[in-house]
C-alpha cells in the first residue's frame, strides 16, 4: 500500500510495525517518525484507524476474559521465536493448549474413576453386554 507520495519512512515499513505503534511498544524516537508518516499518508492513517477500532472492539468484547497463564506464556514464547527469526512449530498455540487441556481433563477423570468409556477401555465390555442381552 502506498499513497504514491515519497515519504521518509516507506508505507510497507510503517504497516509492518503498526501494532508496535498501536500497543505503545515502539521506542519514542520511532513513534515521532511514525506519526509524521501517518500525518502525511492518508492510506496508512486509514489503516491505522481501522486497526485501532478493531483493537478497541476486541478489548470491549473480550477484554474481561482471563487468559490461562500457560497459554499466555506459550503465546509470548512464539512471539519471541518469531522476533528472533527462528522456526515456529506448525501447530497453533490455541490447538496445542486445547489438546493439553483435554489431556488434563481426561487424566483427572481417570483419577476420579469417572473417565469416559474410551478413556477407561470399557467400550468393548459394554458392547459385549449389549449383544448378549
Image (cartoon, rainbow, N blue to C red):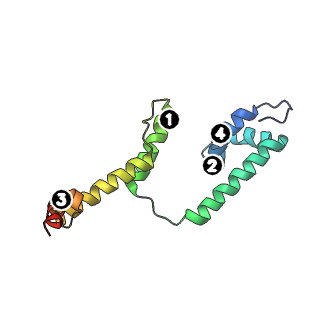
Q: Are marks 4 and 2 in contact (CB under 8 Å)?
A: no
Between the C-alphas of marks 1 and 2, the distance is 19 Å
Determine whether the residue tagged by mark 3 lies in a helix, strand or loop. helix
Asked if residue 128 lies left or right of residue 109, the reply is: left
Q: Nearer the viewer, mark 4 or mark 3?
A: 3
Pick the residue in front: 57 or 104.
104
The residue wearing badge 1 is 82
Residue 120: numbered disc:
3
Q: Position of residue 114 (x, y in %)?
A: 20, 67
Between the C-alphas of marks 4 and 2, the distance is 11 Å
Pick the residue in front: 5 or 108.
108
The residue wearing badge 4 is 17
Q: Is residue 95 above or below residue 11?
A: below
Between the C-alphas of marks 1 and 3, the distance is 40 Å
The residue wearing badge 2 is 24
Which of disc 3 and disc 4 is earlier in sequence? Answer: 4
Amino acid at each position: 500500500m502506498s499513497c504514491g507520495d515519497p515519504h521518509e519512512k516507506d508505507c510497507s515499513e510503517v504497516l509492518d510495525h503498526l501494532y508496535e505503534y498501536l500497543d505503545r511498544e515502539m521506542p519514542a524516537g520511532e513513534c515521532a517518525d511514525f506519526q509524521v508518516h501517518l500525518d502525511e499518508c492518508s492510506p496508512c492513517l486509514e489503516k491505522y484507524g481501522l486497526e485501532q477500532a478493531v483493537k478497541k472492539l476486541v478489548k470491549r468484547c473480550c477484554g474481561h476474559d482471563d487468559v490461562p497463564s500457560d497459554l499466555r506464556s506459550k503465546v509470548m514464547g512464539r512471539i519471541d521465536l518469531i522476533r528472533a527469526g527462528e522456526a515456529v512449530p506448525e501447530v497453533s498455540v490455541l490447538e496445542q493448549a486445547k489438546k493439553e487441556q483435554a489431556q488434563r481433563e481426561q487424566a483427572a477423570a481417570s483419577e476420579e474413576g469417572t473417565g469416559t468409556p474410551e478413556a477407561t477401555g470399557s467400550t468393548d465390555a459394554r458392547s459385549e453386554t449389549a449383544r448378549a442381552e
